Image: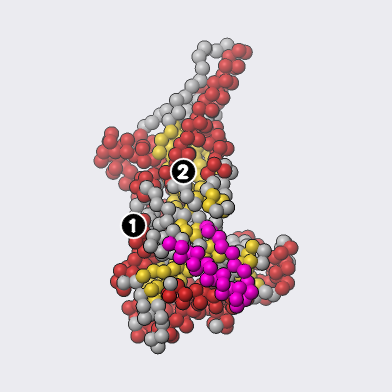
Amino acid sequence: MKNRILEIFEELMVMKSVTYSEKENEIAEYFGQFFRKLPYFQINPEYTGVYQITGDPFGRTIPYGFLKGKSNETVILSGHFDVVSTEEYGSARNFAHSPGEGLEKKLALMDLNERARKDLESREWIWGRGSCDMKGGLAIHASLFEEYANMALEGNLEGSIIFMLVPDEESYSAGMRSGAHLLKELKDKYGLRYKLMIDPEPTALAGQNQVMSIGSVGKCMPAVLVQGKKGHAGHFFEGLSAISVLSSIFSKINGSLEFCDVYEKEMTVPPTWFKMRDMKEVYDVSIPHRAFGYFTVFSLITTPEDIIDKVKKISKEAFLEESAKIDAAYNKFKEVTRTIDGGVSYEPMVITFSQLRRKLQDERGDEFENFYSEAKQKIVSKINQGTLNYPDATIKLMEKVLDFSAISRPVVLIGFAPPYYMPVHGDKVKHKENYGTKAFEFVSKISKEYFNQTVIKENYFMGISDLSYSAVTSPFDYESYVHNTVLWGSSYSIDFDCIEDIAVPSVIYGPVGLEYHQFTERVNKKSMLEVVPYVTKKLVEYMWRL
């Protein structure tokens, strides 16, 4: 099996399947052919195919194969085949997709940290873009699947198995969001009982111990649009800078532990703002009228409603503080300068997108709905053309709706931008409680017994993954999230009911890898070629019996 894993791995590596692009189609076709060539599917062609992602701008598909065993107890092998781009490789960029001596010679001349240099000299690692994230894991699953396909052909497959490969995990998870529909269709058609999904994302080392994740962190992206009061810079106290209000909101949120969740000594990292700027398109001597920003919040327990309530509270505080600060400065300014009496005061108006939309629907009915539909369609077309990303598109549509509302007073408008990832835990799937821990305990036992390797449990993988669309283990108000997600509809959606229906406990267990998304990305040879294939095979068979 070692040679076969390595052969598939090398074939996958040369394909530059950069995320959110047509380049992902080459590797999807590779796996489509991979399935069709297997003798089992030549006899049972109805069990394999390529599942079209509806409305995808690049025509991407999900290749899959289903092996029907003696029972309907089913394990799902999955994983994404897209990779991030290679700019950080510098002079080694042309070798990034070609693991081997050429790349390693280039890397040896680069500024490596001590650990990376030691690993390079050890010859125990394979380097290159996608080596650990996650073509090494896919090669393992593909090789195992070939073996299971031969067993199924001979009628010796104890349980059933699905191998489903998805695009777009590194961007918006269009693959797994659609993959949930495919899993539901297969489940309903063949009466399958899903026991576990194994995602071979690269697993980390904690000292000498391998980490296994039985869940995955959630992530949402609040978008904030601030409208101040425009004024000439020479009449400072007659205006309110949108930048000053947004900066105050930023300082209260960025890095704030108030947004962190804790679960059994595991803690999410605090929020990070990805973008913050004013919306002036030309230079003039006026106070910035509008500004925007968006940031990421990771969650284990906190719901989108909780997050938006926190952002509303902070926004009101920031509004009042900025108003009070200007008023205090104005009062001191008056002591020196001839000016009129009075003060500076702004009543905070903080509103969610769903509240504003409901207000406009009530006041202007079809006029607003027609406007909103047309405006969204134009913006979505730019997303599909690749000239606009989801967060920036969200802000543009929020701005157009705010323009339509004709609200002229200072306001903070809050919504959500895609993508959204639900927190998921393998022990919390209804009627399949503790499956995640049972899978971990089995892996831990086998790894220690056969390879003298200690495996430690991580409740939540903090790197974000497609596991978020395998089950709903932290219920929340779907409608509230949907109505605050500005671009929700044909361009971006999540079928929460479908995900609740498939209800697959899921774990992350793949070969040990380091520094993925960096030019020093690498996968451990022994882990990829020996340890993980053997343990995964044993885990699949254990879950069939569970």
Residue picked out by circle 2: 307
Q: Using the image as rendered, state which of residue 243 and residue 5 is in the foreground.
A: 5
Left or right of residue 379: residue 201: right
Q: Using the image as rendered, state which of residue 237 and residue 123 is in the foreground.
A: 123
Q: Residues within 10 Å of mark 2 (few under 14, many from 20)?
A: some
Q: Residue at x 50, y 14 (%)?
A: 342
Residue 390: say if magenta: no
Query: In the figure, residue 490 lies in which quadrant?
Result: bottom left
Residue 444: say if magenta: yes
Determine whether 338 is above or below 207 in the image.
above
Q: Using the image as rendered, state which of residue 51 and residue 545 is in the foreground.
A: 545
Circle number at residue 245:
none
Q: At which x and y percent is residue 348? A: 45, 28
Determine whether 225 is above or below 467 in the image.
above
What's the amino acid at mark 2?
Answer: Ile
Q: Residues within 10 Å of mark 1 (few under 14, many from 20)?
A: few
Residue picked out by circle 1: 497
Q: At which x and y percent is residue 410? A: 45, 29
Q: Is mark 1 on a helix, strand or loop?
A: helix
In 3D space, how far apart are the residues under numbered discs 1 and 2 (Cα atoms)?
22 Å
Q: In which quarter of the image is the C terminus?
A: bottom left
Can the viewer see residue 216? yes
Q: Which residue is drawn at 57% across and 70% down?
A: 444
Q: Which residue is drawn at 34% across and 52% down?
A: 489
Q: Which residue is drawn at 46% across and 61% down?
A: 427
* Magenta highlight range: 433-461
Name, please, the residue furthest toward the bottom: 154
Q: In which quarter of the image is the N terminus?
A: bottom right
Name, please, the residue furthest toward the left: 366
Left or right of residue 412: residue 205: right
Colouring method of the image: secondary structure
Disc 1 or 2, which lies upstream in sequence? 2
